[in-house]
Amino acid sequence: MRWLILIIWFLSTSILLQPRGVGVFGVCVSYQATGDLCTYIAYLRNGSSISMRRTLLPDEFVKYASGYWPSPYNPTRENLFKKNDLSCLVIFDSTKWKEYPLCSPMDSLWKIRFRAHPFTKNGEKGWSNSEFRPSPNQEKYLFKEYGIRSLDRDYFVDTNLWKILRNVQDPNWITLYQNIP
């Protein structure tokens, strides 16, 4: 009988519980060793502590944040893009059995930092008033609006992430940002 109780206790304490905390997503707009211009993250915030921080590929970011894939960062699989008025989604091509995440605002984030795309020579222009980083006044604006002190190390997180993703689609915001001296 003792062995049975011991085995039941062991099994019940060995079961992995759902991680606690609120899922938070973020993006950093800076050069990456991979050649990407953005780093996407997710983590759980429980009060002042952070756990399960993970760097995500852009496709993973869209799949987790849209609720297409299950994750501890979005356990209810809520479409956070839809909740934040963004038209990002995952399309499944049944002929190729492949998933295609689509999120055009993510494709524009590099424009916050650069005057022209640093790797392609297709002539696409960014919104920065300096070559490789925003002008000092644009940096002040990013701090005031989004809490970004340095694009090299700070992340647009939580509500500021959704706000910047909406703003990079808004022609009025783009004009405002470009016209900051």
Image (spheres, helix red, strand yellow):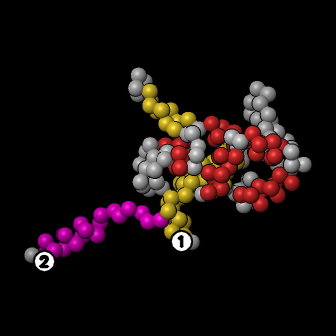
> Element under label 1?
loop
Residue visible at 70% across and 46% down?
A: 167
Whole-Å distance between the Cαs marked 1 and 2? 40 Å
Q: Which residue is mark 2?
A: 2
Q: Look at mark 1 in the image and give the residue it sits on.
A: 47
Quadrant for the N terminus, please.
bottom left
The relative height of residue 131 versus residue 145 in the rendered view (above or below) is above
Is residue 141 depicted above or below 132 in this figure?
below
Q: Is residue 17 magenta?
A: yes
Q: Is residue 110 left or right of residue 10?
A: right
Secondary structure, magenta segment, majority class:
helix
Marker disc for residue 141: none
Q: Disc 1 residue type? A: Gly
Pointer 1 local density, CA inside 10 Å: few below 14, some 14–19, many at least 20: few
Q: Is residue 102 visible?
A: yes
In front of the other: 159 or 125: 159
Q: Position of residue 49 (x, y in %)?
A: 54, 70
Give the farthest residue toward the right: 181
